[in-house]
Amino acid sequence: MTHGGESMKRILTFLSFLVVVFAYAESSQAQDPRPIGVSSTSAPVQSRYEIIVTTSRVRAVLKLDKYTGEVFELARNKTLVKNKDEEHAWQRTKRLPNADKDEATNEVNYQIYASGEYGIYTYLINTGTGATWILAKEAGKEELYWYPLKHQ
């Protein structure tokens, strides 16, 4: 085999390798684009409600009203459960006021971002105004609340 033939063979082998790598990367991305350790429903973009499971520092199952920004935590709280056969109920989480403009609309206006497997925080954002909160839990208490993040 000539020197030129060997070079061409190496180039073709390298290009074949790249095609396989990119095909694998594309199929991995297509399976689940969410960060590792974050789960949510695959609700339509314009749906009003969505369920998010966080695995950050504050672990929770949350239900978000994407119109109003109200967030509920799935809780095992006997005062919320009305029927003896029920174990869980949705408990509204407290959201402290934000200095940024924050208003509900009749369209999708809020989103929860839960960082991946090793992430520390979960955020609630008003996608129209940018008002943002971080999910927090007071030491020694079970209730979650949303603490506002301020712009500098």
Image (cartoon, rainbow, N blue to C red):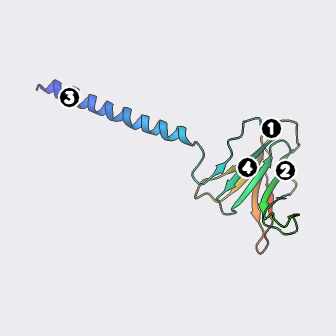
Answer few, some or many: residues within 10 Å of disc 3's Cα (few below 14, many 20 plus, some between 14 and 19). Answer: few
Between the C-alphas of marks 1 and 2, the distance is 12 Å
Q: Choose between 17 and 147: the one closer to the eye.
A: 17
Q: Amino acid at mark 1?
A: Val
Image coordinates of residue 56 in percent, x first then y, are 65, 60
Q: Between tags 1 and 3, which lies in front?
A: 1
**Taking 128 as reference, is 57 left or right?**
left
Secondary structure type for disc 4 = strand
Q: Amino acid at mark 3?
A: Ser
- Residue located beneath label 4 in the image: 51
Q: Earlier in the sequence, mark 1 or mark 3?
A: 3
- Answer with the quarter of the image where residue 147 lies: bottom right
> Horizontal placement of 6 versus 116: left or right?
left
Residue type at mark 2: give it: Glu
> What residue does disc 3 label?
7
Q: Residue at x 32, y 31 (%)?
A: 16
Which sits earlier in the primary sequence, circle 1 or circle 2? Answer: 2
Nearer to us: label 3 or label 4? 4
